[in-house]
Amino acid sequence: MCFVLYMAAPRSLPLIKWDEKNPALHIEELGEGELEVQKHFSLPYCYHVGSDTFCGCGFRNASYQNGSWPDEEWQPDDFDEDGDMQAMHEQLTRFLRRQLRPDDAVEFYGLWEDDLSLSSLSDLQIELPRLTESEFFFRDRGRYRIDQVEQGIVPNP
């Protein structure tokens, strides 16, 4: 079973197709079996966010166990030794900075596939730079909201 990551935005975003020869960040419309995940978002445009592993497993993610997310607190010494997960977080952050207006909000919801109807166990508001911090993990059944893609920047009229 894989971790899956979904994102919602205030406007339509460009899609990035999966490229098996060059695995990287890809943004896709929801598939027919994923439509129920929309109920977890307040923003209208929902997407499946994939990583270099095709699913969301290429992002740092923490499994919910016994009332907490222990992966956030402990990782083996060789965790993300090749830096692939960090690269995925950086690609996602760059995509958001390029595609959204500075004062736009964006939402994420991560969970294990086939659990789309389960309600969130964690609702956090974060700032965009948090996504690239090595201690940041997308939580299983964690919902995140970023209210401004870039704070302190005034959009051009």
Image: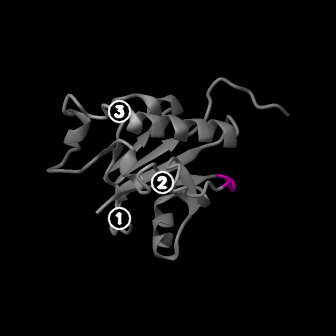
Instruction: Say what amino acid the circle numbered 1 marks.
Output: Glu
One can see residue 79 in this view: yes
Residue in the foreground of this view, choosing between 135 and 124: 135
In the image, the segment drawn in magenta is: 10-14
Q: Mark 1 vs mark 3: which is more N-terminal?
A: 3
Q: Position of residue 44 (x, y in %)?
A: 62, 60
Q: Which label number is shown at residue 50?
A: 2
Dominant secondary structure, magenta: loop
> Which residue is situated farthest in the left direction here?
66
Q: What residue does disc 3 label?
A: 82
Q: Mark 3 vs mark 2: which is more N-terminal?
A: 2
Q: Position of residue 127 (x, y in %)?
A: 50, 32
Residue at point 52%, 71% (across, down)? 31
Q: Is residue 59 rendered to the left or right of residue 39?
A: left
Above or below residue 118? Residue 152 is: above
Q: In 3D space, how far apart are the residues under numbered discs 1 and 3 (Cα atoms)?
A: 25 Å
Instruction: Say what amino acid the circle numbered 3 marks.
Output: Asp
Q: Which label number is shown at residue 102?
A: none
Callout 2 crowding tier (Cα within 10 Å): few <14, some 14–19, many ≥20: many
